[in-house]
């Protein structure tokens, strides 16, 4: 399943074969399309296409190129179009100082008009920005966080991407990411968290490398997805799932999932989600605000039994590793964890446990010896080098007992589990070098996890 969030299938390029183009896209796994209007006529056609094809949605706008020629009637028509069924965005709108086909002041005024229309209709915006980053950012910032959207066909710098990300925007890249000389653009792709990435073709323009110079079409997303996968060190399936989820979050299209997964794949690792429970409420934990990890919905309706977990695992030897992780703290369900880990070891799996290290307090006894022979690697969240900071960062229900117990857990893990790693989240509140020193003194591996990058 994939979403092409930016196509112009209403353009004359497709007048003879739009049915075939859509069919080819569906065969290539494109489940939804957003057809993006560039003037009133094209916005009307977008809405018509959305009526004709169940999986196609429309965005309506007047392109900045035409900003100096917008009539009152034209704008009224556009406002009416924005209220039509299946219109999911306002765009493409923005600023184009590369071609400068309209006066800058007119472009800025029209951009603001579009933003205000989007806010009124509670729709996201699709931004076109060419050589106008500074003004674009200034205008978007002036609406504070009231507006959401995507900067399409991004061609700016990492710094500009960072500023749009700070404003809560998504970023999408078109075919040029596949061009052999586009190394600096690919560096920008790497800097955009995959949770903020959207797929687009911008067809008929900018066909990806194998089709470069030809008419582009949504099925050609298949040439771009492997590039994103490689840059983000994820699988093709991961990119498809995550960007589809992102499109749903921004545009509200597609199915809403509400059943938490007990086993889910990221890259070639299988993750097991065995509980929602956790004694901590860490300030950096995303589970309070977002039940998704890399496009997988994880909030469980009920805790799975060992049997249900084993059935969901299938053949564990085909994965690089099987990880107890998920939405809550796995040692909350020590019996099930041990039963399933035993099954995994008997069936040739490499097993990792990601834990907050409070398993001794949770279970009222020292548990590391019980994990001997069942777990190959244990990754324990150290989080900080100070007990006081731990209290503030982790809000543990065990209060003052938590940090000393975590320390003794790490030491006991080292005696019983072959590979022990401690981790911290890279946020300003954490003294990373002091934590690294603690890991060295304890003789365990150390890892800094990226804030807001789970899975
Ligand atoms: S210990 Fe882990 S799961 Fe629990 S609140 Fe902290 S980050 Fe979230």
Image (cartoon, rainbow, N blue to C red):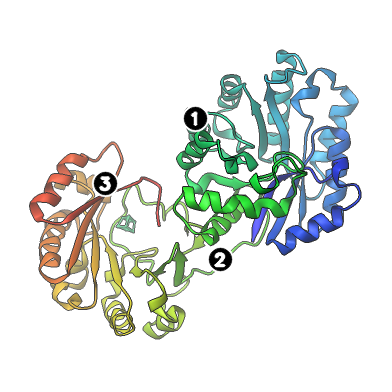
Q: Is residue 17 above or below residue 122?
A: below
Neighbourhood count class around disc 1 (C-alpha, 10 Å): few under 14, some 14–19, many 20 upward: some
Looking at this view, is 450 or 70 the one in front?
450
- Image point 56% across, 59% down: which residue? 241
Q: CA distance from mark 3 to mark 1?
A: 26 Å
- Pointer 2 residue: 258
Q: CA distance from mark 2 to mark 1?
A: 32 Å
Looking at this view, is 47 or 372 the one in front?
372
Q: Which mark is residue 44?
A: none
| Relative image position of residue 210 (x, y in whole percent) | 66, 48
Under tag 2, what secondary structure? loop
- Pointer 3 residue: 393
Under tag 1, what secondary structure? helix
Q: CA distance from mark 3 to mark 2?
A: 29 Å
Neighbourhood count class around disc 2 (C-alpha, 10 Å): few under 14, some 14–19, many 20 upward: few
- Pointer 1 residue: 163
- Picture quadrant of residue 53: bottom right
Looking at this view, is 28 or 160 the one in front?
28
Query: Is 310 placed left or right of 296 in the picture?
Result: left
């Amino acid at each position: 399943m994939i979403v092409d969030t930016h196509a112009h299938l209403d353009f004359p390029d497709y007048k003879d074969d739009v049915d075939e183009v859509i069919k080819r896209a569906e065969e290539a796994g494109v489940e939804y399309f957003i057809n993006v209007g560039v003037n009133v006529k094209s916005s009307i056609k977008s809405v018509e296409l959305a009526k004709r094809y169940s999986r196609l949605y429309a965005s309506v706008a007047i392109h900045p190129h035409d900003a100096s020629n917008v009539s009152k009637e034209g704008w009224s028509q556009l406002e009416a179009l924005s209220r039509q069924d299946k219109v999911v965005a306002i765009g493409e709108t923005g600023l184009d100082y590369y071609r400068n086909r309209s006066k800058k002041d007119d472009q800025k005024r029209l951009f603001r008009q579009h933003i205000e229309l989007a806010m009124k209709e509670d729709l996201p915006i699709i931004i076109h920005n060419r050589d106008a980053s500074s003004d674009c950012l200034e205008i978007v910032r002036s609406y504070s966080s009231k507006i959401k959207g995507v900067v399409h066909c991004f061609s700016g710098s990492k710094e500009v991407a960072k500023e749009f990300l700070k404003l809560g925007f998504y970023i999408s890249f078109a075919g040029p990411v596949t061009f052999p000389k586009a190394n600096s653009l690919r560096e920008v792709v790497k800097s955009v968290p995959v949770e903020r990435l959207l797929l687009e073709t911008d067809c008929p323009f900018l066909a990806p490398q194998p089709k470069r110079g030809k008419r582009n079409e949504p099925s050609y997303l298949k040439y771009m997805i492997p590039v994103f996968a490689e840059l983000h060190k994820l699988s093709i399936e991961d990119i498809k799932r995550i960007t589809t989820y992102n499109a749903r979050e921004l545009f509200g299209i597609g199915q809403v999932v509400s059943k938490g997964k007990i086993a889910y794949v990221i890259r070639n690792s299988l993750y097991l989600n065995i509980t929602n429970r956790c004694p901590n409420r860490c300030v950096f934990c995303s589970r309070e605000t977002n039940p998704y990890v890399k496009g997988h919905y994880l909030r469980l309706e009920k805790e799975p039994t060992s049997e249900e977990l084993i059935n969901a695992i299938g053949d564990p030897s085909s994965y690089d590793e099987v990880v107890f992780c998920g939405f809550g703290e796995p040692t909350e369900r020590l019996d099930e964890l041990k039963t399933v880990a035993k099954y995994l070891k008997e069936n040739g799996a490499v097993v990792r446990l990601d834990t907050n290290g409070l398993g001794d307090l949770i279970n009222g006894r020292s548990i590391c010896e019980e994990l001997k022979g069942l777990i190959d690697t244990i990754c324990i969240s150290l989080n900080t080098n100070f007990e006081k900071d731990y209290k503030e960062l982790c809000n543990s229900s065990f209060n003052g007992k938590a940090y000393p117990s975590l320390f003794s857990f790490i030491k006991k893990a080292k005696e019983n589990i072959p590979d022990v790693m401690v981790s911290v989240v890279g946020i300003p509140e954490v003294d990373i070098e002091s934590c690294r020193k603690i890991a060295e003194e304890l003789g365990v591996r150390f890892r800094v996890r990226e804030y807001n990058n789970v899975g």
